[in-house]
Every structure is written in structure tokens, then in C-alpha cells.
Image (spheres, rainbow, N blue to C red):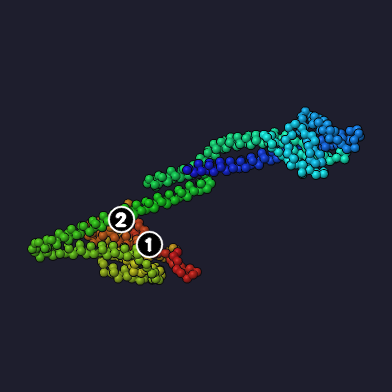
Amino acid sequence: MKFSYKILLCSLITMAAAFGIGGYFFVNDVFQASLEREIGQAADDSSILKFAFETAALNIPSKYDILQNSVIEEIGGNLENSGQGSRRLLRLCDEDQKVLYASDGFLGDTVLLGEIREQVRAYQIIHPDRHYYIQTGVMVNALGRTLYLETMKDVTDVYAERTRGFAVYRGLTILILVCCSIVMYIFSYWLTKPIRILTGATKKMTAGDYSSRAEQISSDEMGQLTMDFNHMAKVVEENIHKLEDEVRAREDFIAAFSHELKTPLTAVIGYADMLRSRKLDDEKHFLSANYIYTEGKRLETMSLRLLDIIVTRRYEHEPQDTEVDELFGYLKDLYAERNEVPVLFRYEAARIRVEANLLKSVLLNLTDNACKASEPGGPVEVRGEAGENGYCFLVEDHGVGIPPEECRKITEAFYMVDKSRSRSHNGAGLGLALCVEILKLHGSSLEIESTPGEGSCFWFVIPWEEVSADGTAEKT
């Protein structure tokens, strides 16, 4: 069952129960008020008849000392016919509760006689046939006799009014419920519109349209739910795109890795087969063996770089306080005897908290790439500057440079801007990917600024570490 129908059904059930209970008490309260009014009038009539009977008895000539039964019957007949426009129903009984006079049609039982007392007016409601009556009884003292005077008042109309009241209220309730059903259906349809919109957006997302968003049509709780849904959809879309990019990058990685393996292996197999199947002179034998050795070393370098990347991603490094002099001294010793591309060092002394061996690998890769990109004699500058947010390392060359569209891809594994130039230096496009992974461990990232034909600058910032109140080191 739809949610709007549930709202409509629950509202109708609640309204029907409220109208039913309220109508019952309302009609019954009106009926009780009318019935009590009729009972009061019947009691008053009974008192009037008692007074009239006693007055009539006193006006009888004192021929007898005791009121005779015949006189009682005569007075009873006069009282019965003295009603204004209506015939009274009454009954007179003697001391022994023997009926002395009764109107035609008086259907009351004798149970009430046992409840009549001096100065006490008794009554009961009887239903001998299809009519309802109020039967009243009083005690009458006249000329030394104690008599019982009973009356009957027809109150069928009161009960009929109650029945009509229930019927009218029932019909009115049904009419109101029908009208309310229409109004509540419109309201429930309007209130559940955001849910239908969310359902539609959910179905579109299920079908693969992750850019689908739900329209916010209110600012209440449903509007907040729509905002939360759209935020969730945005996060899901970003994660999906991220996963797609990761899958695409993985496929590109596998394709590039397969290609990088295929090229040297083809050459190695070809030259090895040549050595195996032919007798070559010393020069060709040396060239073939040298080519096999060179390609083997390139495969070894590529394997080691891949292993470094995998290990770095799973590596839990333990940073230690390290002097910048140690890092730059390591690079100076490595490039001291390289004269084809001079490497210039300029740095500020400082103490940073890093994993020294990993950071040396980053600086070595960046410096080595700068040397490869530079023409013979072109200087490479390696600088270190202490800044407000951390210590900045810069490696700058004045070589061929990198096109802007290539800067975003250059840190991907196996990606090389100039493949022929990289292979001539036994490169496989893994150095910068390794640098990125190492810098992630240190809370940093590799930034690239390059102009084709003028050179490139690679730089990163190692954040300062401060000691917090609990004694642990925190990056700033």
C-alpha cells in the first residue's frame, strides 16, 4: 500500500473513531437532558394530581367519615379527564395496593408500588410495547385513608428523537468523512510528493544515472531529507568517478606494464636466439650480449621501482628528527663527480621530522630526472628554504620542459613524456610515482611548474611538527 494511502486510511480511521465516540456522547447527552426534563415534568404532574385529589376529597360533603371507594373512582375519573388537550393515564390503589381506579390503557406494573414512601416520589421507565412511558407514584392521604396515585407519561418521542439524532449524526459523519477523504487525499498526495521525487531519483541512480538529483520543494524535514539525499548522491557520484578513475588507471597501468615488459623482452629473446643459433664474430657477439645486459638492467630497475612503490604504500614509516645538512650532503656526494650536468646546491639549515631514507629517494629521483631533462652543461639547482608552513625542497632544471597537459599525468606509473629519451636513460616512468607515494606518507604532495623549452621546477613542502599537550608530535 502506498504511503499516501496509509496516511489517508489512518486519518479516516482516526476521524471516524473521533466522530463516532463524540457523536455518541453528544446525542446521548441531549437525550439524557430531554429525558430528565420529561421525568421532572411527570413528577410535577404527579404532585399536582396529588394536590388536586386531596382538594377534591376535602370538598366532598362530610356524609361519610371515611372516603369511599366510589368517591375515589369518581375523583379519579375527573382527574383523568381534566388534562389540557391530552388524556391522562392514572391509577389509584388502596392501602392494600388493590386497584380502585385505572385509566384505559394504563399498562404499568405494580413493582413501583413497593417503592412509594411518604414524601417520596418514585418513578420508573417502562417499555411494555413499542412505546416508552414514565411511571410515577406518590402517596395520598385523604379523609383518613392512605392511597397510592400512579401516572403514566408517554415519552416515546424522546426516544424517537434520540434515534433520529443518531441517524442524522451518522449521515452527517459519513458526509464529512467523504469530504475529508477528498481533502486528505489531496493533502497526502502533496505531503508525499518529496518521497515520490526521491523515489524517482533513486531509480535513476539505480539505473546508472549518478548525476541525478532530487528537486527540493520544501524547507521542512522532507526538504532536509532531500538535501541529505542530494549530498549523499554527490558523494556517491564522486566515489563512483573515483573508482572508475582507479579502474582506468589500473587498466592503463597493466597495459603500460605489459608494453614495458614486451619491448625489452622481445629484444632480449631475439638477441639471445641469435647468440644461440648463429656463430657471430667477436664484435657482434659483444653488441648482442651488451644489449641483453642493458635491457636486463632496465627490467631490473623497473622491477625494483615497482617493488618500492608497493612497499611504500604498505610502509609504516617512523619519522625521526633529521638535519637538512644530512640530506643535501648525501646528494652532494652522489653528484660530485658528474661533470656533464652540474648540480648546484643552496639550502637553509633546519631540523625536520622525516623518514630520511625515503626522502633521500625522493630527492634522488627528482635530481636524476632533472639531469636527464637537461642538456649537457645545463645546470640543475637543488634548493631548500624554511617557510612558515614547513621546509620547502625545490629541484629546478633548465632543460626541455614539460607541456602543461602532460604535468597532470607525469606522476602516473609508466607514463613518460618522451619515451625514447627516457629509455635511453633506462627509465620506465616509475620514479615520480614512487615520489608521490613517499610524500603522501609525510603529509605532503609534489607540485610541478614547467615551461616547454625553458625548464621545470619540482617542489614539495615537509610540514613542521609540533609537540602537542599530550606529548605527541603533530604536523602543522
Q: Is residue 217 visible?
A: no
In the image, what residue occupies the spot 32% across and 65% down? Answer: 311
> Which class describes the residues within 10 Å of circle 1: few (<14), some (14-19), or many (20+)?
few
> Which class describes the residues within 10 Å of circle 2: few (<14), some (14-19), or many (20+)?
few
Mark 2 or 1: in front is 2
Q: Is residue 357 left or right of residue 125?
A: left
Question: In this picture, is 406 found above or below 339?
Answer: above
Question: Within the image, what quadrant is residue 167 found in?
Answer: top right
Helix, strand or loop for disc 2: helix
Q: Residue 327: where, in percent of width, then height? A: 35, 69
In the image, what residue occupies the spot 34% across and 63% down? Answer: 313
- Using the image as rendered, state which of residue 192 and residue 7 is in the foreground: 7
Please give the label number shown on residue 250.
Answer: 2
Helix, strand or loop for disc 1: helix
Which quadrant does the C terminus fall into? bottom left
Q: Residue 253: where, in percent of width, then height? A: 28, 56
Is tag 2's residue or tag 1's residue first in the polypeptide sequence?
A: 2
Whether residues under marks 2 and 1 lie with C-beta atoms below 8 angstroms apart, the answer is no
Please give the label number shown on residue 24.
Answer: none
Q: Residue 183: where, in percent of width, then height? A: 55, 37
Please give the label number shown on residue 440.
Answer: 1
- Using the image as rendered, state which of residue 319 and residue 118 is in the foreground: 118
Q: Is residue 275 visible?
A: yes
Q: Amino acid at mark 1?
A: Lys
